[in-house]
Image (spheres, coloured by chain):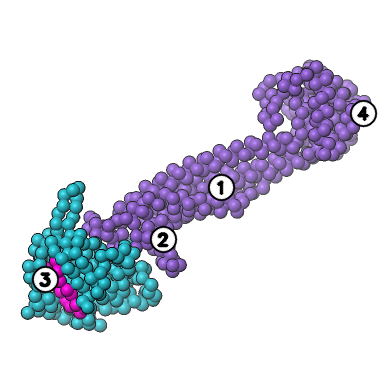
Chain colours: A purple, B cyan
């Protein structure tokens, strides 16, 4: 039994190799399909691990309040360009009440926007963050030089803290503390420089500047509302109860009786992770469908070429039967041949896919992302298994056709 | 017990309700070691008969005893096994595998057998037909006469009881044809049963017994009195 299979496989590869060009073209569909799946799975896994590691770097006991209602996992209204103005600084003040919110350790309101920062004759386009004194604790970041602005200054002092890159670009090695820069003609005194952080959640954290919320709100943006609130909870066990309390007080303050009519939404990072997983899951489903389509198309190509092969080799089949091959042996020969074809296609596809994913990972690292090269053994085994299966499934009809050939007609076939 | 015994054997071809009777009741016995020529004009049913005798096809009616066993009820698997172990075919058109070496061609029947030492057996069979020096040639690199000798080696490699040769010299010049007939006669001298199908009297006379058929019936079955012996060309023979 085993020996006859080995013999079969030997014959099969002789048959495949004697038609190299055609065999290669035949499996091209499988090669491309498999390589595509490997690449996309690898890039997907790389991106997912990158984003997840950055999110968890922020900590899982953060909560955020966004203006506008949104469902649990979908994007907030702002993502569609709608500016909701219902959230105000008094909402933050209400949450600073320690008796009502014993688990919130730090909380801050935020506004952000683009800014051109000027010092002497230099100017740089950057982004500003108007926030409160609690910012470094919430975001778990440190100040390298000087200090962050304090609770007294946050009420409206003209002070600014520079991101690491901004400081380097404007001042180089000279000391920035005490210097006065201007944004939209508003003079701001530099009180601190943030420590270097790198890229988090696809944003360069060192390319921004920080100032008191009121300055950003009133002097730079000219608005009365705030864009979002972030707070830190003492332990991730208390996140859910705190979210509940926050929702309750915001409904009280905004006079909302039916949660359906909420003009805000409260999130924690766990739900952000859920959102991300939901997105990657639907991406994966899409991939499975794409892979399925490409394998079916590849499989039909295989079936087609196997039918041609069977027709071309009718006399050979007749001869094999004449010298003692059983129908089963003929059938197996063509099934193995078809499976071996697609197996070769799958192996080539995996190799190409792995190489391209690896190059992409190197590229992403060169671009400064903390990118992992991920190709799971499971995806390789699956890709190769599915390629063999495609060959066998689409080889069935041609193989049965070959096995059923009448030896005499096959021998007489011209 | 005869090697082959057929009784009132018939074969009809049925194509779209049109029944063409090709063999119309054939009876004979062939003993082990015989050299029989089945001769008749083209279309008389010789090949059809040979295919049935060689288990490539089944009769429409009648009995076929092979080594004393009634084969009518044998299934495809058993017939494949008999073809592999007990029968060797030589066809007019050689039927060698293209893009394949001489040696691999001769090994083909062994692929479907339980035997081992394929290379040694195939080499021995090829030496037997004087082609020991052509083992690794491809089939498109040898002459027609050599091709037919490769086909004979392939028929012999499993050491079958009987060799069926259907117009084996039909595609050959007379010198190569003579060589093929010489090999068949030598094999018969060594004890192999040979059944030769031909439409030429000249070729048929190399056998020891002649069965003439016409329109699917035997019209003559007799011993050949003046048997032709193929000339020894001194190049073969073990
Ligand atoms: N598959 C078939 N269907 C119908 N008729 C056939 C078929 N095969 C052979 N025949 C007919 O059977 C007759 C005998 O053919 P064959 O045995 O090949 O004769 P021979 O070998 O003596 O020339 C011929 O008339 C041929 O046309
Ligand atoms: Mg014929």
Determine whether the residue tagged by mark 3 lies in a helix, strand or loop. strand
Q: Which residue is mark 2?
A: A13
Residue at mark 3 to residue at mark 1: CA–CA distance: 69 Å
Q: Which residue lies at the image location 11% right of the left edge and 71% below the top edge?
A: B211
Residues under numbered marks 2 and 4 in contact, where contact means CB atoms less than 8 Å apart: no
Q: Is residue B28 magenta?
A: yes
Q: Which residues are magenta?
A: B26-42
Q: Is residue B101 visible?
A: no
Going from N to C along the chain, the mark reached first, 2 or 4, is 2
- How packed is label 3: few (under 14 Cα within 10 Å), some, or many (20 or more)? some
Residues under numbered marks 4 and 3 in contact, where contact means CB atoms less than 8 Å apart: no
* Chain of the residue where label 3 is placed in the rendered structure: B
* Chain of the residue where label 2 is placed in the rendered structure: A
Up the image or down, A148 lies above or below B102; here it is: above
* Chain of the residue where label 1 is placed in the rendered structure: A
Using the rendered view, name the quadrant where residue A408 is placed. Answer: bottom left
Same subunit: marks 2 and 3 = no
Q: Which residue lies at the image location 87% right of the left edge and 23% below the top edge?
A: A94
Q: Which residue is mark 4?
A: A99
Going from N to C along the chain, the mark reached first, 1 or 4, is 1
């Amino acid at each position: 039994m085993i020996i006859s299979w080995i013999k079969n496989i030997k014959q099969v590869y002789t048959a495949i190799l004697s038609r190299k060009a055609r065999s290669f073209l035949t499996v091209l569909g499988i090669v491309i399909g498999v390589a595509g799946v490997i690449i996309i799975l690898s890039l997907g896994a790389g991106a997912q691990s990158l984003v997840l590691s950055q999110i968890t770097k922020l900590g899982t006991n953060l909560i955020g309040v966004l203006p506008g209602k949104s469902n649990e996992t979908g994007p907030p209204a702002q993502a569609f360009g709608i500016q909701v103005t219902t959230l105000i600084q008094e909402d933050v003040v209400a949450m600073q009440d320690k008796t009502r919110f014993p688990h919130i350790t730090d909380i801050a309101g935020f506004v952000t926007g683009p800014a051109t920062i000027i010092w002497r004759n230099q100017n740089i386009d950057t982004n500003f963050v108007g926030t409160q004194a609690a910012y470094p604790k919430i975001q778990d970041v440190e100040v390298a030089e000087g200090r962050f602005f304090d609770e007294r200054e946050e009420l409206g002092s003209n002070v600014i803290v520079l991101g690491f890159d901004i400081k380097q670009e404007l001042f180089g090695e000279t000391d920035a503390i005490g210097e006065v820069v201007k944004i939209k003609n508003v003079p701001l005194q530099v009180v601190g420089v943030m420590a270097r952080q790198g890229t988090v959640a696809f944003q360069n954290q060192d390319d921004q500047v920080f100032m008191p919320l009121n300055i950003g709100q009133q002097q730079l943006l000219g608005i009365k509302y705030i864009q979002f609130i972030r707070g830190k909870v003492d332990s991730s066990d208390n996140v859910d109860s705190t979210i509940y309390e926050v929702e309750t007080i915001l409904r009280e303050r905004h006079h909302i009786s039916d949660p359906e009519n909420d003009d805000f939404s409260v999130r924690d990072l766990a739900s952000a992770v859920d959102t991300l997983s939901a997105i990657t899951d639907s991406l994966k489903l899409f991939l499975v469908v794409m892979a399925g389509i490409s394998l079916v198309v590849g499989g039909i190509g295989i079936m087609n070429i196997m039918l041609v092969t069977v027709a071309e080799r009718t006399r050979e089949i007749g001869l094999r039967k004449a010298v003692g091959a059983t129908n089963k042996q003929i059938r197996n020969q063509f099934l193995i041949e078809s499976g071996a074809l697609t197996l070769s296609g799958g192996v080539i596809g995996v190799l190409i896919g792995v190489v391209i994913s690896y190059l992409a990972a190197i590229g992403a690292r060169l671009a400064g992302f903390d990118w992992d090269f991920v190709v799971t053994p499971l995806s390789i085994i699956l890709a190769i298994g599915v390629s063999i299966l495609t060959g066998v499934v689409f080889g069935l009809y041609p193989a049965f056709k070959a096995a059923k050939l009448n030896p005499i007609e096959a021998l007489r076939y011209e | 017990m005869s090697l082959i015994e057929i009784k009132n054997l018939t074969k009809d071809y049925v194509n779209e309700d049109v029944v063409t009777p090709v063999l119309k009741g054939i009876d004979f016995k062939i003993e082990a070691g015989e050299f029989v020529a089945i001769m008749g004009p083209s279309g008389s049913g010789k090949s059809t008969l040979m295919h049935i005798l060689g288990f490539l096809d089944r009769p429409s009616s009648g009995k076929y005893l092979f080594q004393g066993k009634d084969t009518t009820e044998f299934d495809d698997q058993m017939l494949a096994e008999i073809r592999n172990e007990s029968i060797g075919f030589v066809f007019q058109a050689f039927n060698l595998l293209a893009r394949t070496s001489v040696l691999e061609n001769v090994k083909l029947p062994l692929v479907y057998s339980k035997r081992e030492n394929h290379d040694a057996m195939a080499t021995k069979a090829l030496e037997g037909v004087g082609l020991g020096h052509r083992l690794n040639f491809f089939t498109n690199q040898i002459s027609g006469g050599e091709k037919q000798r490769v086909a004979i080696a392939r028929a012999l490699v499993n050491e079958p009881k009987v060799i069926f040769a259907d117009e084996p010299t039909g595609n050959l010049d007379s010198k190569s044809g003579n060589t093929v007939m010489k090999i068949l006669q030598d094999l018969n001298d060594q004890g192999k049963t040979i059944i030769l199908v031909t439409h030429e009297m000249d070729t048929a006379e190399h056998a020891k017994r002649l069965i003439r058929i016409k329109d699917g019936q035997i019209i003559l079955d007799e011993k050949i009195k003046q048997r032709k012996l193929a000339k020894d060309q001194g190049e073969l023979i073990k």
